[in-house]
Image (cartoon, rainbow, N blue to C red):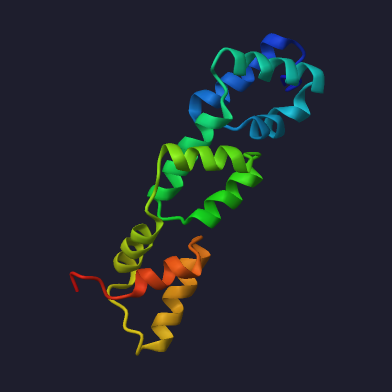
Amino acid sequence: MKDNKLETLGEVKAAAVRLLARREHSRAELVQKIGGRTEPELLVQALDALEADGYLSDARFAAVYLRSKASQGFGPMRIRSEMGRKGIDAALWQQSLEDEPVDWFEQARDLARRRFGLVSRDDRKLYAKCMRYLMTRGYNMDQARYALQPGDDD
């Protein structure tokens, strides 16, 4: 059986490139995935080299992640929280938002309409259910309220 230990700089870089070939990863994700299989100094060297060569970019990861999660209907609070867990700081989150602005209010409205149709405030149980749903998806209270208001086309 082959030993999973990565002992050379080339092996560490190759392992990281294999992961990056599947999808974008943040530096912190690669540290987590590869860190237990090699020496810390070797890992830092390999990741620094990959960043210098343009294979690894936390800014690119943040932009791709934002687009992906926003298109899946997740709100800004949830995406920012998940990015934090993936090692992306607030500055990169903010930069990715500036590069690709998202209308969170309209996105919340589209999601609510697809999921629940038109919701009347008179149906308090359904209204509360929709609010909870939107808030667990990462929208704030204002965005959730906007999503459930009747629109101009209704």
In the displayed structure, 70 sits above or below 52; it is below
Q: Residue at position x 51%, y 37% from top? A: 95
Q: Position of residue 115 (x, y in %)?
A: 34, 67
Q: Residue furthest left?
A: 153
Q: Is residue 38 left or right of residue 154?
A: right
On the question of residue 60 being in view, the answer is: yes
On the question of residue 24 being in view, the answer is: no
In the displayed structure, 127 sits above or below 26; it is below
Question: Which quadrant, please, contains the N terminus?
Answer: top right
- The image shows a total of numbered marks equal to 0
Q: Which quadrant of the figure has residue 142?
A: bottom left
Q: Position of residue 104 (x, y in %)?
A: 40, 56
Q: Is residue 129 left or right of residue 112?
A: right
In the displayed structure, 14 sits above or below 154; it is above
Q: Residue at position x 40%, y 81% from top? A: 127
In the displayed structure, 115 sits above or below 94; it is below
Depth check: give the residue in front, 8 or 61: 61
Depth check: give the residue in front, 129 or 145: 145
Q: Residue at position x 43%, y 65% from top? A: 143
Q: Is residue 123 left or right of residue 62?
A: left
Q: Residue at position x 57%, y 12% from top? A: 53
Depth check: give the residue in front, 8 or 65: 65
Question: Which quadrant, please, contains the C terminus?
Answer: bottom left
Q: Position of residue 110 (x, y in %)?
A: 31, 61
Q: Position of residue 99 (x, y in %)?
A: 43, 36
